[in-house]
Image (cartoon, coloured by chain):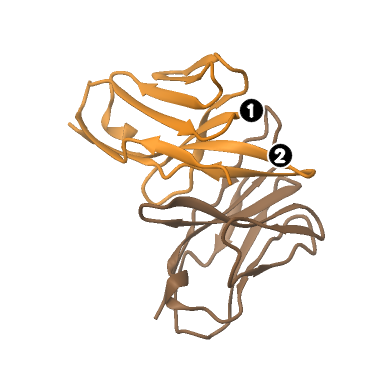
Amino acid sequence: EAQVTQNPRYLITVTGKKLTVTCSQNMNHEYMSWYRQDPGLGLRQIYYSMNVEVTDKGDVPEGYKVSRKEKRNFPLILESPSPNQTSLYFCASSPTVGNYNSPLHFGNGTRLTVT
Amino acid sequence: GQQLNQSPQSMFIQEGEDVSMNCTSSSIFNTWLWYKQDPGEGPVLLIALYKAGELTSNGRLTAQFGITRKDSFLNISASIPSDVGIYFCAEQISQGGSEKLVFGKGTKLTVNP
């Protein structure tokens, strides 16, 4: 089944403790992206990647890192999490953006709480 | 940067009623996308619009790309309980060889049986 898989679904951590949220897609998509969703603010892009070893900042990259060493995986890294990073995170992928038949496929989300 | 203004923020309707929501932009768009997010899940693409004036339907959903290229609306006819969720408009932006999506803040729809 074609899908975007995020892990974990739920994570509670403490300030400053490094964490990684994994994202994997099995559709051989070139484009992958991370979003955070906050009440009243909608979905905001954190980082995106057009292909392997190519990553770019989105609208809210501060406090986050990503890597794209292989096409299927795009982990989101929080080196020193802070409470303002408590949010619902979504990973998404598509063959390429800007293609009629290339909708973004979203994972089911990771709810992160930083205390 | 690009700004998407989506309204209304929330809607409470009775089953069977029609629904309309819209998005406006501060600048000209080349695409409009409408997504729906069911509770506890990621957003799913409903309709994609690529030409000014384009009117596209997907079942009970109809969306239009405004002539000015600065707005779009989404209509849902004869709403049913499973229409509950958050609806997002989104724009594809191409900049310097890279592309990304920018989302509106969403319209939360509640349908009372």
* In the rendered image, residues at marks 1 and 2 fall on the same chain: yes
Q: Colour of chain A?
A: brown
Are the residues flagged by discs 1 and 2 in contact, CB closer than 8 Å? yes
Residue extending farthest to the right is A53
Mark 1 closeness class: few <14, some 14–19, many ≥20 residues within 10 Å: some
Instruction: Count all numbered tags in the image, as a single digit.
Output: 2
Disc ID at residue B94: 2
The chain coloured orange in the image:
B
Chain letter of disc 1 in the image: B
The amino acid type, in three-letter code, at marker 2 is Ser
Is residue A31 something one can see in this rendering? yes
Residue plotted at (70% across, 34% down): A98
Instruction: Say which element carries label 2.
Output: strand
- Picture residue at 43% right of the left edge, 38% below the top: B5
Q: Which residue is mark 1?
A: B30
Instruction: Say above or below: A35 vs B50.
Output: below
Judged left or right of residue B46, residue B80 is left
Q: Nearer the viewer, residue B94 or A5?
A: B94
